[in-house]
Amino acid sequence: MAKVLVVDDDPAIRQLLSDVLELDGHEVHVAVDGADGVRAFASLRPDFVVLDVMMPHLDGYGVLRSIRVEAASAVPVLLLTAAPDCAARGRESGASYYLAKPFTADEVLFLIDGVLGHETPIADVRAAVDVARGRGYSGYS
């Protein structure tokens, strides 16, 4: 399927997204902060980026600026944020989409699969979310 880069300083969110996206068939790479995200983007050239806004050292807007200006890339970027003013600033910065925290894993899956033209059966999405939340399914718990 697609190569997805997840950039988030929260280890729980990185793990959840990584697990769910891998179970959905995507090749997932993670970055632990903005600077790591810029380096990972340059070397990986992913098909989709999931990017937290509020991170130490280099925030998501700085990473997004690097993607759009320095790398001259139009790759779809999903901003994840708890900040209420993200929609306008994200659009001005070149974000393709945004989701407010808290979000659900299936919202992320539906968005990414929709953007990339992949369809995931609803049962598979629910199974992936259950596994990512540690519930397992049919013998995998």
Image (spheres, grey):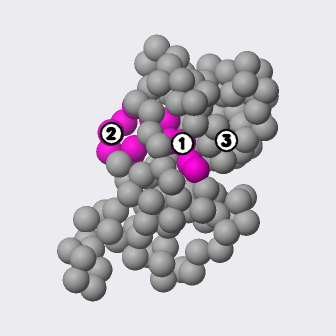
User: Where does the magenta region start and end?
Assistant: 3-14
Residue reaching furthest to the bottom: 138
Q: Quadrant of the C terminus?
A: bottom left
Can you tell which mark lies on residue 49? none
- Confirm whether the magenta stretch covers residue 11: yes
Which element type, helix, strand or loop, lies under badge 1? strand
Examine the image and state in which quarter residue 50 appears.
Answer: top right
Residue 20 place in picture, x, y as percent: 43, 61
Which sits earlier in the primary sequence, circle 2 or circle 1?
Answer: 1
Type of residue at label 2? Pro
Relative to 16, residue 126 above or below: below
Residue reaching furthest to the top: 57
Can you tell which mark lies on residue 11? 2
Residue 91 place in picture, x, y as percent: 76, 35
Relative side of 49 to 54, left or right: right
Residue 55 place in picture, x, y as percent: 46, 24
Alpha carbon separation for disc pair 2 and 1 = 14 Å
Type of residue at label 3? Val
Which element type, helix, strand or loop, lies under badge 2? helix
- Residue shown at 58% from the left, 37% from the top: 44
Nearer to the camera, 10 or 41: 41
- Residue shown at 69% from the left, 27% from the top: 67
Type of residue at label 1? Leu
Relative side of 93 to 120, left or right: right
Neighbour tally class for label 1: few under 14, some 14-19, many 20 plus, Cα within 10 Å = many
Q: Is residue 43 visible?
A: yes
Reading the image, the residue beneath label 1 is: 5
Residues tagged 3 and 2 counted as in contact (Cβ below 8 A): no
- Residue shown at 65% from the left, 74% from the top: 119
Which element type, helix, strand or loop, lies under badge 3? strand
Reading the image, the residue beneath label 3 is: 77
